[in-house]
């Protein structure tokens, strides 16, 4: 004859039943695919795919336009341009204006973003792409994120520009990585062509002046 199993105390029996039911329910939810682990929710990006050849064309044109400053008393290698991401319409282009405006924040990218926003009458550049002859510094990349730009395309790298003057060595991609704001960063594009802005003899003279302790 089979011996009867000892009865569990009422409280212990209730706890065992609830534990079993909880485990069964959890297993069922996972196996049925009812649970989705929470993750970051990137902002919608409206940038349309751009052919590499078009990026290269726009970058070379921007670099050539920026190069016109080499024939002026205030040459600068930093130029930036804003295009509509879908239509390709140019909204604004600008160069670094730090010395011209006595504004340490008037880097080419920030200058272009300010002018573009002013033209639109909006603080947002969502739906637009920024091209710049040099990889944005952390300040400029942060401004691009706050402006809501879809995409940033750069020419020369931060490492290359650091050969000619002071630089904050945090890449544009790293700034985006540490943010919860979505923005595509592409580059370098036409790096060597953009570097000619930095190596231009007139620009080299300006760099020596900029880096002088007495300046």
Image (tube, grey):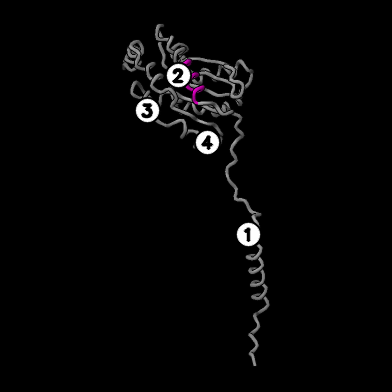
Foreground tag (3 vs 1): 1
Left or right placement of residue 45 versus residue 72 in this view? right
Q: Which quarter of the picture shows residue 1?
A: bottom right
Q: Position of residue 182 (x, y in %)?
A: 56, 34
Dot 4 surroundings within 10 Å: few (below 14), some, or many (20 or more)?
Answer: few
> To which residue does mark 4 refer?
179
Q: Give the mark nearest the N terminus, 3 or 1.
A: 1
| Residue 65 screen position, x and y as percent | 46, 12
Earlier in the chain: of badge 4 and badge 1, it is 1
Q: Which residue is mark 1?
A: 31
Whichever of callouts 4 and 3 sits on the residue coming sooner in the sequence is 3
In the image, the segment drawn in magenta is 52-62
Can you give x and y, in whole percent of width and height, for residue 95 in the image? Answer: 47, 15
Name the residue: 46% across, 24% down: 154
What residue do we see at 35% from left, 15% from top? 210
Res. 109 visible in picture: yes
The single residue placed furthest to the top in the displayed view is 72
Density class for disc 3 (Cα within 10 Å; few <14, some 14-19, many ≥20) is: some
Q: CA distance from mark 2 to mark 4?
A: 24 Å
Look at the numbered disc 3 and give the secondary structure of its residue.
helix
């Amino acid at each position: 004859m089979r011996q009867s199993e000892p009865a569990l105390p009422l409280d212990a029996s209730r706890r065992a039943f609830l534990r079993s039911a909880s485990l069964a329910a959890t297993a069922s939810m996972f196996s049925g695919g009812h649970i989705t682990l929470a993750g970051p929710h990137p902002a919608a990006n409206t940038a349309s795919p751009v052919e590499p050849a078009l990026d290269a064309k726009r970058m070379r044109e921007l670099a050539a336009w920026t190069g016109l400053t080499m024939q002026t008393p205030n040459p600068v290698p930093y130029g930036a341009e804003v295009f509509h991401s879908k239509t390709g319409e140019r909204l604004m282009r600008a160069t670094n204006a730090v010395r011209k405006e006595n504004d340490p924040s008037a880097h080419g990218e920030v200058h272009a973003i300010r002018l573009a926003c002013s033209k639109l009458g909006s603080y947002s550049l969502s739906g637009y792409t920024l091209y710049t002859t040099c990889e944005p510094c952390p300040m400029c990349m942060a401004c691009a994120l706050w402006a809501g730009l879809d995409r940033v395309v750069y020419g020369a790298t931060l490492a290359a520009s650091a050969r000619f003057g002071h630089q904050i060595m945090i890449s544009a991609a790293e700034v985006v990585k540490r943010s919860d704001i979505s923005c595509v960063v592409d580059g370098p594009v036409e790096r060597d062509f953009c570097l000619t802005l930095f190596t231009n003899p007139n620009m080299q003279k300006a760099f020596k002046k900029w880096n002088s302790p007495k300046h």
